[in-house]
Image (cartoon, rainbow, N blue to C red):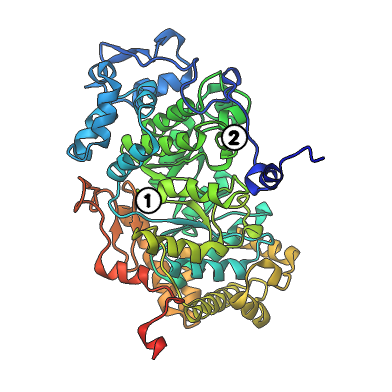
Amino acid sequence: MRTRSKRFEVLAGRPVNQDGFVKEWPEVGLIAMNSPYDPKPSIRIEGGKVVELDGKQRKDFDFIDRFIADYAINLDMAEEVVAMDSVKLAQMICDINVSREEVLKYTTAMTPAKAVEVVGHMNVVEMMMALQKMRARKTPSNQCHVTNLRDNCVLIAADAAEAAIRGFSEQETTVGIARYAPFNALSILVGSQTGRGGVLTQCAVEEATELTLGMRGLTAYAETVSVYGTEQVFTDGDDTPWSKAFLASAYASRGLKMRFTSGTGSEVLMGYAESKSMLYLEARCIFVTKGAGVQGLQNGSISCIGVPGAVPSGIRAVLAENLITTMLDMEVASGNDQTFSHSDIRRTARALMQILPGTDFIFSGYSSVPNYDNMFAGSNFDADDFDDYNILQRDLMIDGGLRPVTEEEVVKVRNKAAKALQAVFKELGFPEITDEEVIAATYAHGSDDMPPRNVVEDLKAIEGMMARGITGLDVVKALYKNGFEDVAQNVLNMLKQRVSGDYLHTSAIIDKDFNVISAVNDENDYRGPGTGYRLSKERWEEIKNIPNAKDASDFE
């Protein structure tokens, strides 16, 4: 006599049931939206100063409240906007007949609690409609991770080159061994500029090193500058909103683009959610970012995605935080950069909410390497999903920022990038990159396919590299001297961007001809059908042309 349904036995073995789920527990912050402990929106201004914010008097402000009140809110309309019907404001944000420019007058005058209340009236389809309009830059784009378990510099260069021709506008690397950072930064720079000129790169490490690498011209931007929604979590990181704002200005003054990072769930994950909803605390992070004068924010729960993913409406809250960022007129790199589910259906559904409306960067780290090599803990999509992603673009006639490529293209550019880095290493007196390593990187799937390097010798060379004061200009000279004039010119052009500063504008990317495309010269003007970003004939032909699609001539 059976005691269990066979159907339920099968369901129990499905991947989705390996995920973790919890019921709402507002007292500890395990609630995505609409906590009973969230404050009601309010603001009172006396003598040009905010004396009440979201139910709290100024004498009771913590430092996040004070920073937001003093720097983040457009006070000209604040009292009027907070008093408005939140449903009407939500309708305005979704309405194709109301321009983004008009909406921003209202949304930039909101308080955190008001912004949360407004988006709380939207379902996910309405949020996506709103996001399509509120995105800062008209043209959507994408960012990727380029890392590997062994910090193998040759493989990083080859992977970066492939990622560049696949269409990524930004590339981010990090390290397994902290001291490898300069080599990883150098490798992703050379590799990306081999693929195409104009790709922005970063090396996500501790902030002093990251800034140093940027000042030397080895990286172009940064985004791992985290902000949080409760004072206790902020101070646990030995930071305040003012110190983060100072750091942001340090990057900008050196010609480096940068974003802050935050995401729903970080405060409850760190144990200090103060009984508030994840989205309300994230809204405070977004307002801190605005107040600091930073052009954009990487959010979408990021490394905390498992927390909102475990509670009801959590993935909806992630979409809501992306939307609120755009409502404050900032660039959004909208997450999708860490896997959170064993279910292919769930991870695809989570990504589609950013892919379909398009964001400034749909992923803030698509893993352009196999996830076993992803030192950011594994992305929602990885290198094995490239074909799926390209076909999604083709199926739905959308621009997700990527392009199909042929095997021949990839092999050629990976080989060139590995050889370019080989030449740079030889010219600068670094440990040899062998021809065997070049060939392995050309055809590799991941670091398992690479011969080992002498880590001790690499680290000695890195120490010498930093002591010698090697900069991006030294890289240009090395490339040019060894016959890689085109790559040298691309690296030099990236250094020139540091002087002009045009790519510090909100939501800036650089195309292959080194034209800066940003919210300034590519402002989103979506007003419904026939407006906003539309695939050009050329771009649609590119998306359609997947290598495995049959041609009429194949049947002759």
- Residue 24 is situated, as x and y percent measured from the top left of the image, at 58, 24
Q: Which mark is residue 310?
A: 2
Q: Residue at x 63, y 34 (%)?
A: 21
Q: Quadrant of residue 449?
A: bottom right
In terms of secondary structure, where does tag 2 sit?
A: helix
- The type of residue carrying mark 2 is Ala
Q: Residue at x 58, y 66 (%)?
A: 156
Q: Residue at x 35, y 31 (%)?
A: 122
Give the mark nearer the N terminus: 1 vs 2. Answer: 2
In the displayed structure, does residue 382 sit left or right of residue 138? right
In the foreground, 507 or 252 = 507
- The type of residue carrying mark 1 is Leu
In the foreground, 184 or 369 = 369
User: Tag 2: Cα neighbours inside 10 Å, few (<14), some, or many (≥20)?
Assistant: many
Q: Answer whether residue 256 is visible to the viewer in this image.
A: no
- Residue 229 is situated, as x and y percent measured from the top left of the image, at 50, 27
Q: Quadrant of residue 128?
A: top left
Q: Which residue is mark 1?
A: 356
Q: Residue furthest left?
A: 97
Q: Residue furthest front?
A: 1
In the foreground, 96 or 369 = 96
| Circles 1 and 2 in contact, beta carbons < 8 Å | no
